Amino acid sequence: MGSRLIILDPELCLTTPPYHWLSTGFRSFDHCIEALCSLDATSRSDEKASKGLRLLAPNLLKCKQDPDDIEARQQCQLAVGLAMDNIRAGIPMGGSHAIGHQLGPLGVPHGVTSCIMCPAVMKYNLKHGGGNPEIGRRQAKIMDILWSMSEVASTFEHAGLSQVSADLGDLLDAHIRALGLPRTLSEMGISSDLIPGLSERALADFWAPTNPVPLLKAEQVREILEAVA
């Protein structure tokens, strides 16, 4: 994370299997989402995360449509740098990362954990964050960014979503499905009987309490996990 020099060459990435390219790309998408949702965000972190989101959202879709799109791959690489800058700066992530860290030991690839957890965590935070209007305001800002890009908006419309009724979780779900990536625990071979243990272990993650709705009880995590069982 503290590298002095990073060489980005999109041509070297052409042989990366699409599943890994797209899922790890969405992991950075999740970095931007949770940074923008963080109640400890700064104007600088918001700027970087917003820029990263504007690069990743359309260009991941372009990479799905045309794996040989060099420009799209380079834009994704640049976006990852912006996303990681906020991690290095100490902007705390939330429930998607906290719970996702517990899915890795069960064989879920790092990027796929975000595909499964991020939409569910956004919905949970919106549902249970009524006492803090900042949660809804920050999610609304992300939605405005996503709808403002024509390529991304058309993906939402194709999924039958509208700006009037869809929430952030709905938009993320549509984007992930357009990338052809997993959305549920069962798709990754994780049965519902593992949820209680996962829920307990997630509480020990350092980003569980920094979720916009702090995850302090196992039943909170269980609700999120059951939504994507």
Image: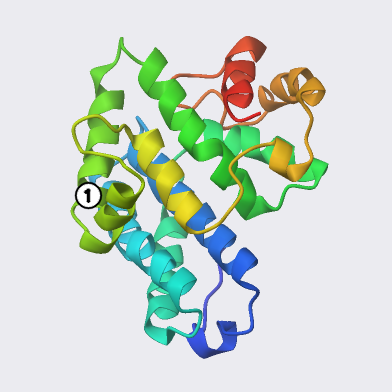
- On the image, the x and y values in percent for residue 135 come to 31, 25
| Location of residue 114 (image quadrant) | top right
Residue found at x 41% / y 46%: 174
Q: Nearer the viewer, residue 41 or 134?
A: 134
| Relative to 202, residue 96 above or below | below
Residue found at x 31% / y 42%: 160
- On the image, the x and y values in percent for residue 152 come to 30, 57
Q: Is residue 17 visible?
A: yes
Answer left or right for 31 relative to 217.
Answer: left
Q: Nearer the viewer, residue 147 or 125?
A: 147
In the rendered image, which quarter contains the C terminus? top right
In the rendered image, which quarter contains the N terminus? bottom right
Residue found at x 49% / y 82%: 8
- On the image, the x and y values in percent for residue 22 come to 54, 64
Q: In terms of secondary structure, where does tag 1 sit?
A: helix
Q: Residue furthest bottom?
A: 11
| Relative to 153, residue 192 above or below | above
| Relative to 144, residue 224 above or below | above
Q: Is residue 88 visible?
A: no
Q: Nearer the viewer, residue 159 or 25?
A: 159
| Location of residue 208 (image quadrant) | top right
- Provide the residue designation for mark 1: 147
Residue found at x 40% / y 35%: 169
